[in-house]
Amino acid sequence: MERRNFFAAAGATALGAALLTGKAQAQSSGRIDTKLAELGVEVAAAAAPVAAYVGWRKVGNMVYIAGQVPSGPDGLITGKLGDNMTTEQGYQAARACGINILAQLKSALDGNLDRVVKCVQIQGLVNSTDDFTEQHLVVNGCSELFRDIWGEPGLAARAAVGTNSLPLGIACEVLATFEVA
Amino acid sequence: MLRRTLFTAAMAGVLAACGKSEDTSPEQQATDNMPSASSGGKIDAKLAELGIELPEAATPIAAYTPIRKVGNMVYIAGQGPAMSGRVGVEFSLEEGQEAARQAAISVLSQLRAACDGDLDRVVQCVQLQGLVRCQSNFTEQHLVMNGCSELLRDVFGEAGLAARAAVGTNALPIGFVCEVIASFEIA
C-alpha cells in the first residue's frame, strides 16, 4: 500500500495533480467506468515505471502496455506457483496485473476507456516451478477480468508461459496490447 | 574477459565480420553496403559521441528473419550478446547489464538495416522484451534490462524508452545471458 501510494504520488507529481483530477471527473461518466464500478474494480493512477521504460506506447490505433506487476492492498504479490502459491492465488495475482493494465490504458486514452475497440494480445508470464502446468488458468485471472469489462472484445490472442523467475519475485507479469478508437 | 574474447571471436566467425577491425577486408567491403549517407545522420553522430560502432547486422542462426516491416512498424528478432552464462551465477548484475547493452547494440544494427541505413527515421521504440537467463532466486531482471534500455535512451532520448517487460528464464539458445526482442515505429 505504501508502495502504491508512493507510485501514485510520483505519478501525480509527474503528470500534474490538476490534470489527473480533471481526468477523474471526465471519466466517471463513461460506459466502461460504470461497468468497472458495477464489478467493484477500482483503477488507481497509473504506476510510474520502476526502471528505464515507459508505461505505454501508442502507435496509430494500437496501445502497447509495458509488463505490469501484481500489486494488491498489501503491496506486491510475490511467490511461485507450484511452490508457495495456489492456482487460485495466482489467478488473483493475474487479475491484479489486469487492473494495473487498466490504469496504464486509462492513462494512454486520456482517461476514457470507452475508446477501447478490443484487446489484441496478452502475454502472461507466471513464476512457476518446473512441474507446475496451469499457467493458462492463472492468466485467466486477467483475461476474465477483461471479458467481464468489454465482453468478447476483451479477450485476446493470448499466450500463457511459465518462467523460473520474475523481477522482485512477483508471481506473474502481464503484457497487453489494445486496439483503440 | 577471456570468455568474452573467445565468444566474440566465435561470433565473428559464425555471424560474419564484426566490423570492429580497422583494416577493411574484401569480404567486409562486400557486406558493408550501408549507404554512406548514414554517417551524416543525427543518430549516427550520437552513436559516435557515445563511442558505439555498430557491427554488421548478424545473420540468422536458425529458421527466421532478423527483421520484419509492417507499415511503419519494424519487428526485430530476438538478439543476444556475445556472452554465455547466467546472471547471478557466472555473471554479476553489472556484467548482465553489459550483456543487455551488447544485445541493444545488435538490435540497433538490425534496426539500421531495416531503416536502409538511416537511424534518423526512428520515431520511437515501442516494445522491448528482455529475457534474462538466471536461477530461480535472481529477481533483478529489470535492472539487467536497464543495460539495454539506458543505451537506447542515450541514443534516441525519451523516444528510446519502450513499453517494456523484463523476464527471467532458465535457458536460452547458445547459452545467451539474455535475449532482447524489440519493435520500433519508423518514419
Image (spheres, coloured by chain):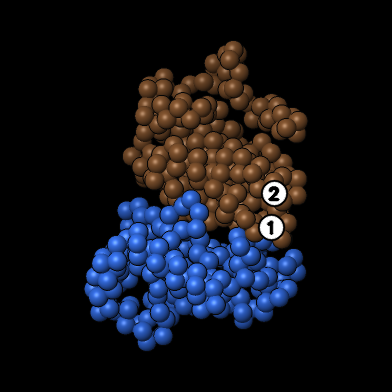
Residue under numbered circle 1: B138
The structure residue drawn at horizontal position 61% and vertical position 40%, both measured from the top left corner, is B98
Structural distance between the alpha carbons of marks 2 and 1: 8 Å
Query: Which is more N-terminal, label 1 or label 2?
Result: 2
Q: Quadrant of the C terminus of chain A?
A: bottom left
Q: Quadrant of residue A111?
A: bottom left
Above or below for B21 versus B80? above
Numbered circles on residues, count: 2
Chain letter of mark 1 equals B
* Residue B100 appears in the picture as rendered: yes
Q: What label does residue B87 carry, if any?
A: 2
Q: Amino acid at mark 1?
A: Phe
Q: Quadrant of residue A104?
A: bottom left
The structure residue drawn at horizontal position 35% and vertical position 67%, both measured from the top left corner, is A106
Please tell me how crowded label 1 is: few (under 14), some (14-19), or many (20+) other residues with Cα within 10 Å: many
Name the spot of residue B58 as percent of width and height, x first: 58, 33
Please tell me how crowded label 2 is: few (under 14), some (14-19), or many (20+) other residues with Cα within 10 Å: many
Q: Amino acid at mark 2?
A: Val
* Residue A180 appears in the picture as rendered: no
Marks 2 and 1 close (CB-CB < 8 Å): yes
Name the spot of residue A62 as percent of width and height, x first: 37, 57
Chain B color in figure: brown
Looking at the rendered structure, the secondary structure element under dot 1 is: loop
Chain letter of mark 2 equals B
Chain identity for the colour blue used in the image: A
